[in-house]
Every structure is written in C-alpha cells, then in structure tokens.
Amino acid sequence: MLNKTAKLLTGLAAGLLTVTALSGAAFAQSVNLTYLIPSGPENQVIADEVVKAFEAANPDINVDIETRPGGSEGDNLVKTRLATGAMADVFLYNSGSLFQAINPQQFLVDLTNEPWQADVQASFKPVVTAPDGTIRGAPARAAMAGGIYYNKKVYEELGLSVPKTWAEFMANNEKIKAAGKVAVIQTYGDTWTSQLFVLADFYNVQAKDPQFASRYTANEAKFATDPAALRGFEKLQETHDAGFFNEDFGAAKYDDGIRMLAAGEGAHYPMLSFATTALAQAYPDNIQDIGFFAQPGDEAELNGLTVWMPDGVYIAQTTPNLDAAKKLVAFIASPEGCDAQTRAGGASGPYLINGCTLPADVPPAVSDLLPYFAEGGQNGPALEFLSPIKGPALEQITVEVGSGIRPAADGAALYDEDVRKQAQQLGLPGW
C-alpha cells in the first residue's frame, strides 16, 4: 500500500513538474507587445513584414499591430494616449517638431545608451532628442529629400548637365524653354506643392548660417531680413517671372505634375522624393528616365541636399514589457529591419542606419540621392526638423509668390508674421 502511495505521489509530482515546465514555456512565449502605427495600406504592409521578420527572430515575443488616424486627429490621439497612460508599448510617430510636441522627456523611454545607436547616422539623432539632451527614438523608415526631379531624356536631348548652382539651373531652364518645352512644372491646384522652392532651399540657408534654425526659433532671424533665407522666395519668383512654368500651373494638380514629368512634357518638378513611388507605380515604363538633384544654391562648393527625416519609433514609459520593446526597436533599427521594409515597400530612399543597403536596381531618382549621404556628401535636415515653428499659411503665400501676385520680399515678410502667431501659440520664449 505504501509503495502504491509512493508511486502515485511520484507520478503526481512528475505530472506537476511537466505542467510547470509547460507553463514556463508557455509563459516564455506569451510576451505580447503592442505596436501602434499610422493607418494606410503602405504603413500596414511594411509593419506586417517587419513584425513577421521580428517574430521569426524572436519566437518568444508576439507583436500586435494597432493603427491610428493620420494628420491632426492622429496627433491628438497620440498625445491623449500618452497623457492617460494608454499608449502602446512601441509606436511609430513623427520626428522633429511634432516629436517635441509630445513631451518626449516625460513620456518616452531614454534610448541614448542602446548599443544600436552607434549605427544611427548623426544627422537623424537631433530630430529625436528631447530637451534634456537624451535620445528617445530610432529611425523607422527611409529618409526622403526635397529637391528637383528632372527628365533625363530632355537633359540628354538638349545636352544639359545636372546643375550645382542656381545660375546653372536657370541657364538650363532657358535652354529648355527655347526648345519649346516646359522648364519647370508647377501644380498649384494642390497648394502644398507650391512650397518646395522655399522648403527645399533650407540646406543652402544652413550652409550660409549654421545657427539660423536656433536664431529663427529664438525670434532672432527672419526670412524677410536674412538674405540666405529670403533666397527661397526669390527663386520661386524668378522662375515664375522668367516664364518657365506650364500654362495651367494654377489649376494643375500633383498627379498632373507626375504625368508631365514622366512623359517629358516638363523637364523639372520641384518635389519631395516620395513621389518616386507614385512615378514607379503609375509610369513604370518611364521610371528610368527620371532623376533627382538637390535644389542648387548660389555656390557650387556648398551644394547639398535638404532632407526630410524619417519617422521615429519610440517606447512609451508606461510599457510593462520594456526588454521586449527594446528588442523590437533594435530590430527596426538594424539591417534586418531595413531589409524587411524594403521587401514590403520597395526602396524609396536611403536608410539612416549604417549597414543598411538598397537593392542594386533602385530607380535613378533613388540612386541619385545616395551620394549626398555617402562619405564626402552633404545633407542636412529641413527646417521643420530643427525648429518647432512652421507657419500654417506658407502654401497660400508661396502660391501668391509663384503666381506673380506678391513679390518675394512681401511673401517672406508675410510668412514671418504667420510664424509669429504660431510661435506665440506655442509659448516660445522671445516672441
């Protein structure tokens, strides 16, 4: 009887050990992270591929993807969830001025000393740095640039070279116009497209005055009175006054601009480089004809690219899964994470992570960006990544300047007033 009892207890103990072991394994596999991204099919497909690759490399962690609206509605939702402690473990959000607006010092985990930060390019770190000097994010996507698309066939036909100065650019435009072609495509039917000559010129501003962004934020520098900053407005006026635009520039829309560029109806289109994806999808037979260059300044030796920094990926201070969340962020900021993004969304621009590469067959408009990021190349963030101030009326003002309604100097002065209102609303000192 005693032996039977002992055997029974031994069996129960073994069973309990088995159950405990299984429970331990199940527990190890039950770390669940939530990852919040902006809605949209492109965001979703990229996030799906990144999570799939991450989970394959980390079988003990499951990631549930959540989506949120974009635009101001999404901004408000992110702020609310952070403020109420209801934020996802990891989330994708803007870098630069909008990052500063979510109070990163209070709500985001400090990632300054994570090992992978050594491979993040220096140009990105300032746009995810909190006011206390700590780095709170990692780059989550490829960078894009503001500059000028050009039709390579038109350039070849007319024997033109990519300009390094504004004077060379204007000389090219004269030759294109003389050949009976549209030199510069403008599409003010979508007013936001009118801003590019001003916004993409910021590398040239910063090259002349490296402290412009901080002085501008402190109300010590103005577009109307700083000669380098005023040049963006002047360039817009000069191209209009020279008659380089398409006749329907006031009504044409972004899609018209893409079509005209692809078809060679227009030679130049100032734009953000995200348009490469639209060009590749809508005009795959023409994508090899399209190149891209930085908006020229007045001195060839200062030629460089204005860069729109990628979104950041961040960890909420409230996460109960900090170690797993750090693993996900580290994966996104790794060559394996870059590869997953490229598989899902194609190659739209350079990643700001050392070791990340692009396929050899990227479109010319993408490969043209790479020298600006290589050793010896020159690039710098757009103003909106260095200052929290961006006036909401800029696109209306640049439509007026680009349409010949308002001179460049008046437009710059009006924009300074637009900026003043926003700076005061933000409560910035010195305004």
Image (cartoon, grey):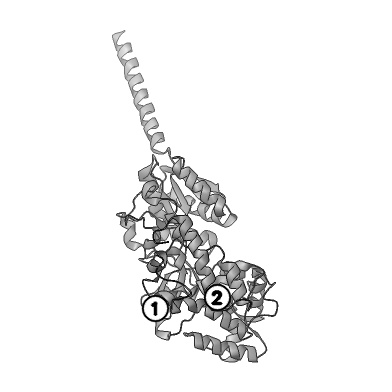
Work out how far the residue at label 2 is from the one at label 1, CA to CA, in angstroms: 22 Å
- Quarter of the image for residue 375 reads bottom left
Question: Which residue, given by chain and number where applicable, does mark 1 sit on?
Answer: 208
Q: Identity of the amino acid at label 2?
A: Asp
Q: Residues within 10 Å of mark 1 (few under 14, many from 20)?
A: some
Residue at point 57% right, 83% down?
238
| Labelled pair 2, 1 in contact (Cβ < 8 Å) | no
Give residue 170's quadrant in the image.
bottom right
Look at the numbered disc 1 and give the secondary structure of its residue: helix
- Residue bearing the label numbered 2: 410
Tag 2 secondary structure: helix
Question: Residue type at mark 1?
Answer: Lys
- Picture coordinates of residue 426 (x, y %)? 46, 56
Horizontal side, residue 68 vs residue 311: left or right? right
Task: Tell which of 245 and 115 is nearer to you.
Answer: 245
x, y percent for residue 232: 51, 77
Q: Where is residue 226 drawn, in percent x and y?
A: 44, 76
Residue sitting at x 46%, y 69%: 307
Q: Earlier in the sequence, mark 2 or mark 1?
A: 1
Query: Does residue 285 sit above or below 427 in this rendering?
Result: below
Quarter of the figure with the N terminus: top left
Mark carried by residue 21:
none
Residue 322: percent from left, percent from top? 36, 44
